[in-house]
Image (cartoon, rainbow, N blue to C red):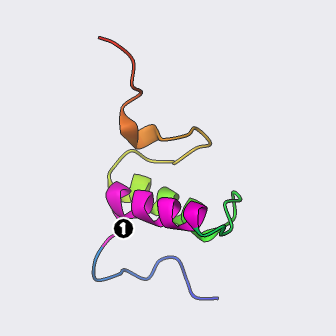
Amino acid sequence: MSSNKTPSSTPMTSSDASRIQSSQAKSGGDMSSGGFSARAQAAGATNSGSGSAGSGANKASGGGGKK
């Protein structure tokens, strides 16, 4: 397995992670906490500056509550 410290030429964004999760869910892919979509979400959260992706659903969506 390769090191997680290797910089990529294009960082993962929350939008990228969302597309990956959607595609994986529609195709019946691995939606577990150790699956690719979960790792993409964590990378997107880290690269967007929000730290850990945690276990909450759709953290990047803004919560959806009334203001």
Q: Quadrant of the N terminus?
A: bottom right
Q: Give the amino acid at mark 1.
A: Met
Q: Residue at x 47, y 77 (%)?
A: 5
Q: How many marks can you see?
A: 1
Is residue 20 within the magenta segment?
yes
Q: In the image, is 63 to the left or to the right of 23?
A: left
Q: Position of residue 3 (x, y in %)?
A: 55, 83
In the image, residue 62 above or below residue 13: above
Relative placement, left or right, of 64 versus 57 is left
> Viewed as shown, does residue 40 lie left or right of 12?
right
Residue that protrudes farthest toward the top in the picture: 67
Image quadrant containing the C terminus: top left
Give x and y (percent) for residue 32: 71, 59
Residue 17 shown left or right of residue 1 in the figure: left
Choose top left, top right, bottom left or bottom right for residue 44.
bottom left
Residue 46 lies in quadrant = bottom left
Q: Hey, which residue is sitting farthest bottom in the picture?
A: 1
- As drawn, 7 above or below 57: below
The stretch drawn in magenta includes residue 9: no
Q: What residue sits 36% from the left and 64% below the top?
A: 16
Compared with residue 51, is residue 20 higher up or lower down, i.e. above or below?
below
Q: Which residue is mark 1?
A: 12
Q: SS of the residue at dot 1?
A: loop
For the record, the magenta segment spans 11-26
Residue 35: x percent and y percent? 66, 67
Mark 1 is surrounded, within 10 Å at the Cα level, by few (under 14), some (14 to 19) or many (20 or more) other residues, namely some
Q: Position of residue 61 (x, y in %)?
A: 38, 38
- Residue at horizontal 49%, vertical 57%? 41
Magenta-colored segment: predominant secondary structure: helix
